[in-house]
Amino acid sequence: MTQLFKKITHYPTLEAAFGRVQENAGCRGADGVTINHFARNLEHNLRDLSNSLHEQSYHPYPLLRFAIPKRSGGGERFLSVPTVRDRVAQTAAFLATKDIFEAEFETVSHGYRAGRGVRTAVYEIKAWRDKGYRYAVDADIDDYFDNVPHDLLLEKLEKLFPGASRVLRLFEKWIKVEVYDGKRVWRLEKGIPQGSVVSPALANLFLDQLDETLLSLGLKLVRFADDFLVLAKSEQEAYDNYELTDMALEDLHLDLNPLKTKVVSFDRGFKFLGAIFLYDGIFMPMPKKRQPGPKPKLPPALNLRKYLELRYKGTEGQRDRGTKAQRGRVEYEDVS
């Protein structure tokens, strides 16, 4: 596992990682540095990052949290985006570890994986339907990305990378990262930030136990990230699977959303991953060119002075607001 850490910190890995970050574009981070600005002195920036990773003096900047409209329309969701420098470091870790993650995952998992996606998930659902599985639990995990317990996630990483203490420390820093939204700074106590490069792999890793548990019980599962179906041959079997799934999630300190989780059938019809399943038909939406929406309103850049001021105010606030401090979240005044 020593070689694994060396691969992450190796300059060519970081150079390839920046290429991916540049290709994906994306906004600036909390430090205000854009991809173009980072690229102006690329070799120096990558050498500096390589040295800080190798010497274990690397610390990620707070994530930049901001709202974007939901693709489905109506409402909004929040992204928590690392700085360009931290995206490069996370991408390097992804490049070095992706095969190890992939070897751990089950074939029923289709989200955020190379060569898999919505279509492979739909084809697998069709295959089970054609074998007589005409009912399903359409499962929704209650606020999955916000509720993943960090201690359990880190335990799973330790099993995946035994003895790789330096690699594990990197992942721990990215998991227990600080977040900045323009008004306050706080440290994540649980959850996986949506917007980080390593988040998809971590999300799949945490739910791999669910996959293994349900498969060991003989259940027919098709999962795309935190959306999944558990298929059955009868309505009663589907309700039984509902209970088994709920119990399996309890071991992960997660819950099904009772308002969104339901038993569905192909004869009544249902929608999953954008596809409509009705009788023996599957109707996929025609691909549309995504229209660029309005640019999100980003919080002001967080410079060192402002960061220290927020941290200092947080320390002062802990004396008067002990209850909030125990929860790990302290409110701050907007100093922008």
Image (spheres, rainbow, N blue to C red):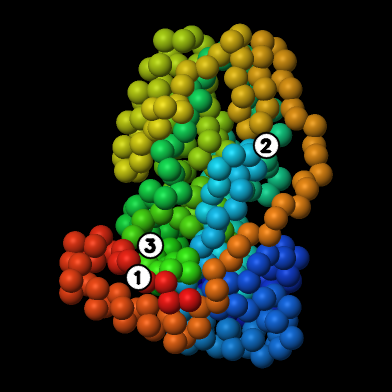
Choose top left, top right, bottom left or bottom right for residue 48: bottom right
Distance from the alpha carbon under mark 2 to that under mark 3? 30 Å
Q: Label 3 belongs to which residue?
A: 188
Q: Residue at x 65, y 43 (%)?
A: 71
Q: Amino acid at mark 3?
A: Leu
Q: Is residue 170 left or right of residue 4?
A: left
Q: Position of residue 289 (x, y in %)?
A: 81, 44
Residue 98 visible, this orientation: yes
| Secondary element type, mark 3 | loop
Neighbours of disc 2 within 10 Å: few (<14), some (14-19), many (20+): some
Q: Position of residue 193 (x, y in %)?
A: 48, 57
Q: Amino acid at mark 1?
A: Tyr
| Secondary element type, mark 1 | loop
Nearer the observer, 155 or 140: 140
Distance from the alpha carbon under mark 1 to that under mark 2? 42 Å
Q: Label 1 belongs to which residue?
A: 332
Neighbours of disc 1 within 10 Å: few (<14), some (14-19), many (20+): some
Nearer the observer, 330 or 328: 330
Q: Residue at x 43, y 37 (%)?
A: 141
